[in-house]
Image (cartoon, helix red, strand yellow):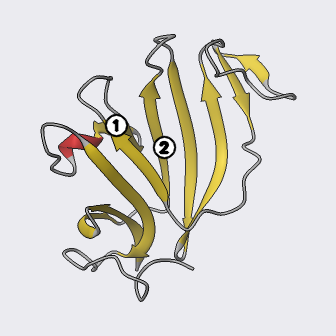
Amino acid sequence: MTGLCLAVAGVITATLPVTDFTLAWTHSVEKTRWEEDYRVAGRVLVPVAARVQGSGAGMEPPAGATLHDGAWHYQPASEPLASLLVTVSPYTSGYELCWDGWCRPLTGIVAMPAHGGVVELLGCRTGALGQSVSAATRPQ
C-alpha cells in the first residue's frame, strides 16, 4: 500500500496510510494561515489546491485566485514532486499535517532536535518505517 512517509536526516521515521493530505502553517511575518493540499500518487506528491488567508510579505495569491470563505483559493502551478522539504524552526510557528478531517503538529508525528531541522515528505510504501531514504527508495 502506498502512503506518505516522513524522513528526518535521511531516515523514514513515520508512515501514514493516506492518499490525500494538507500541509498547513502560519506565515511568520503576516501571521495568516497557509494550506496546501497534496495527493500521493505512487512515489510522487501531486499538488492539488492551495489556500492563503491574506496577502503581503511575499505571499501574494497568484493570478486567477478566488476569494471565498476568508481565503484566497488557487490551483498550484507545479508538476508532481519527488518529495517536499519542510524546514522546522524553533523561531516560527510549526507546521501541521492534516488528513481524514483532523490536523496534528508535524513535530507530534516526527521527533525533531530542539534546534529544528528538515522533514522530507515523500510517497512510499507504508511498510517503510525505519528505512533509509536512498536512491533506491527515493522517488524518481
Residue sitting at x 66%, y 49% = 48
Would you say residue 126 is visible in this rendering?
yes
Who comes first in sequence, dot 2 or dot 1?
2
Other-residue count near label 2 (Cα within 10 Å), few / some / many at <14 / 14–19 / ≥20:
many
Q: Position of residue 108 (x, y in %)?
A: 19, 42
Q: Amino acid at mark 1?
A: Cys
- Left or right relative to 128: residue 123: right
Q: Which mark is residue 4?
A: none
**Image quadrant where residue 75 sits:** top right
Would you say residue 100 is visible in this rendering?
no
Image quadrant holding the C terminus, namely bottom right
**Residue placed most toward the observer, 21 or 30:** 30
* Rendered view: 41 above or below 140: above
**Residue placed most toward the observer, 40 or 94:** 94
Residue sitting at x 37%, y 42% = 87
Image quadrant holding the N terminus, namely bottom left
Other-residue count near label 1 (Cα within 10 Å), few / some / many at <14 / 14–19 / ≥20:
some
Which residue in the structure is indicated by mark 2? 22
